Image: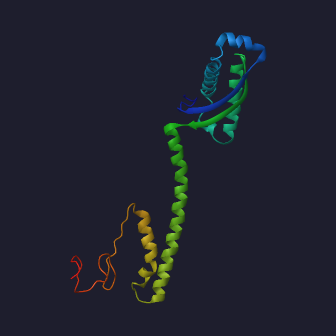
Amino acid sequence: MTLGDRTEATIATTVRFQLIAERLREVHERFGPNGVFGIVRDQSARAVRATLSDTDVGIEQFFGADRTACEVRLAEAVRKSLETEGINMTGFVLGAVELGKTGEVIQATVRARYELERERAEAETRAVRALNDASLEQKLGAPSDAAWRYRETDLWRDLVERTNALQVALRAGPGTATPGRAVDDPANPPGQGPA
């Protein structure tokens, strides 16, 4: 359906009902035993569409305290609509509301706020790491590879997090066991089978 603010939405509702005993014969003659569910569905949908197409209704009605007020308003409209047909509404639930592309924009906006918070936290972490690295460099005296060895674990972790499919191949050094050969030695170079 289209809301009052012209946003398209798919709305799920649950309606529980019972026939008004005094009007049972009238309902049976008008709709038959199998037509009751159809009239409840049609009248409920009509009442929901009429209520939500008012110009004062927009997507804000489906969030927070406004959602509860909207559900009460819809329940009252459905109750009145069904009463005219001899049916008493015993329960109404406003279910999931799918807002299509508008919903995607709302989700992106919500995620953006948390992404910004994450970026700020990571920026603080990077600043502290830089200060630690500078402090370490001063303690070591002359520039050396020691600071890089100190940060090596962090750098590998960052690389893995930023790479979708990282494959690391380590080359075996002399004296290291490898598949197919017990130990690397000059008499048995890589690529050639055992002598």
The N terminus appears in which quarter of the rendering? top right
Looking at this view, name the residue that lies furthest to the right: 22
- Say which residue appears at 71% left-offset and 25% top-offset: 17
- Colouring scheme, one of rainbow, by chain, secondary structure, one colour: rainbow
Residue 57 appears anywhere in the view: no
Image quarter of residue 180: bottom left
Q: Position of residue 96 (x, y in %)?
A: 60, 37
Looking at this view, name the residue that lies furthest to the bottom: 141
- Say which residue appears at 65% left-offset and 13% top-offset: 32
Looking at this view, name the residue that lies furthest to the front: 195
Q: How many marks?
A: 0
Image quarter of residue 189: bottom left
Which residue is more in the foreground, 53 or 74?
74
Q: Position of residue 35 (x, y in %)?
A: 63, 17
Q: Position of residue 101 (x, y in %)?
A: 49, 39
For this view, does 75 lie left or right of residue 156?
right
For this view, does 186 lie left or right of residue 97?
left
The C terminus appears in which quarter of the rendering? bottom left
Residue 136 appears anywhere in the view: yes
Q: Is residue 36 above or below residue 5?
A: above
- Say which residue appears at 60% left-offset and 25% top-offset: 49
Image quarter of residue 173: bottom left
Q: Is residue 21 above or below residue 162?
A: above
Q: Position of residue 147 (x, y in %)?
A: 43, 82
- Say which residue appears at 50% left-offset and 77% top-offset: 131
Which residue is more in the foreground, 170 or 51?
170
